[in-house]
Image (tube, helix red, strand yellow):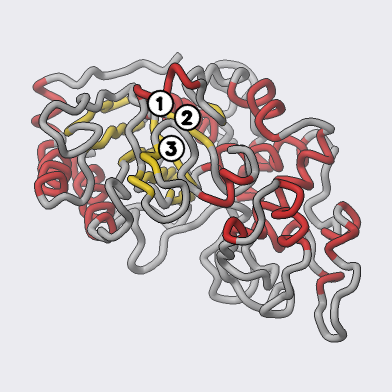
Amino acid sequence: MLATTPESAAARKRFRAAYQALDDAIAARAFPGCAFGVLAGGTVALEGALGRFTYEDDALSVTPETVYDVASLTKVIATTSMAMLLAQRHMLDIDDLLGDWLPRFVVGRKAGDRGSEVRLRHLLAHSSGLPGYVEFFRNHSTPQALLRACLELPLQAQPGTRAAYSDPGFILLGKVLEICAGERLDVWTRRELFAALDLRATGFCPPPDARASIPPTEDDTTWRHRRIQGEVQDENASVLGGVAGHAGLFSNVPDLLRFAAEILRARSEIAKDAGKPLFRPDIVAAFAERQPPQGSLRALGWDTPSENSSSGTQFSPQSIGHLGYSGCSLWVDLKDGIAVVLLTNRTWPDRSSQLIRRVRPAFHDAIRAAL
């Protein structure tokens, strides 16, 4: 269990610029509330929360333990982590061809479409040539139909020649991992990852009686025609039953800091602490390395800081992280031993606000300055 510094007056004073950045964001309606945490030197330096579930005065207040729909953080917390563990157990080779695991991906492709050359590594590095986003849910109402449509997508670029963030790539990767493990993504990760790290609030498909304690992500007026609360916001993940490689995970700040601590504990120089880490140091190093093509900022599953990164200007080049469409983020500095979590529902009541793009770097720079 991580040692924790409570959200005391001293912590508020130390991180006052970060609090101010978030207070200003709430006032500007970037999001109605947020939970956040900081890990530094092996200790939780801060767990805090501001605002409410929605903009109504009588809405529930956010706490550090509030569970959020973390959207595309699923790609690293669940899917990439599962790939890491299967790889280090010699159950999966990320250089395998996708078609060897999902033969339908290569059947019937047009001449010149090099789908037979797509490897699992390309899916992890977002360099498969698959499109970034497809509204499968508009025309496919079952998991089987959606997956079939995903398998039949034409490539937009030759594998390995272009880095372009791809949800369909991670939908397919999630299916490969399920075949490899012989279990559904949610079942395997619950036992082998979340339970192993004591991540008690983390998982897919929250039970109905827990939904009221989760901030809503959207008042959906176009597809589901209801308030989306305690169920996955991403429509494609919804059709897939709430469990997918690209989205569907729910979590909170304490759990994500414990997860980040395990990633940091795998660094070779501190792997001796507190027993054997879940992730081997060589696996973390391999998945944290930027991948081809030249100029890509993508590691395997993970993102790395760019010139105008959401992580701000103070995270080292040896940092990995990821964003979630709902307004969540996790950044881990492998060099400095620091991790920062920010959870919001910036898509409430709709997806129009883009203020989160300014909030994230300001918040992270304020945290790093305080440290």
Vertical position of residue 190 compared to residue 370: above or below: above
Q: Residues within 10 Å of mark 1 (few under 14, many from 20)?
A: some
Q: Quadrant of residue 343?
A: top left
Residue on which disc 1 sits: 42
Q: Are marks 3 and 2 in contact (CB under 8 Å)?
A: no
The residue under the point 41% across, 25% down is 211
Of the two numbered discs 1 and 2 on the same chain, state the one appearing first in sequence.
1
* x then y, percent, for residue 2: 41, 18
| Mark number, residue 261 | 2
Which corner quadrant holds the C terminus? top left
Q: Residues within 10 Å of mark 2 (few under 14, many from 20)?
A: many
Q: Secondary structure at mark 3?
A: strand
* x then y, percent, for residue 248: 54, 40
Q: Are marks 1 and 2 in contact (CB under 8 Å)?
A: yes
Q: Residue furthest bottom?
A: 112
Viewer can see residue 5: yes
Q: Compute the Cα span from label 3 to label 2.
A: 21 Å
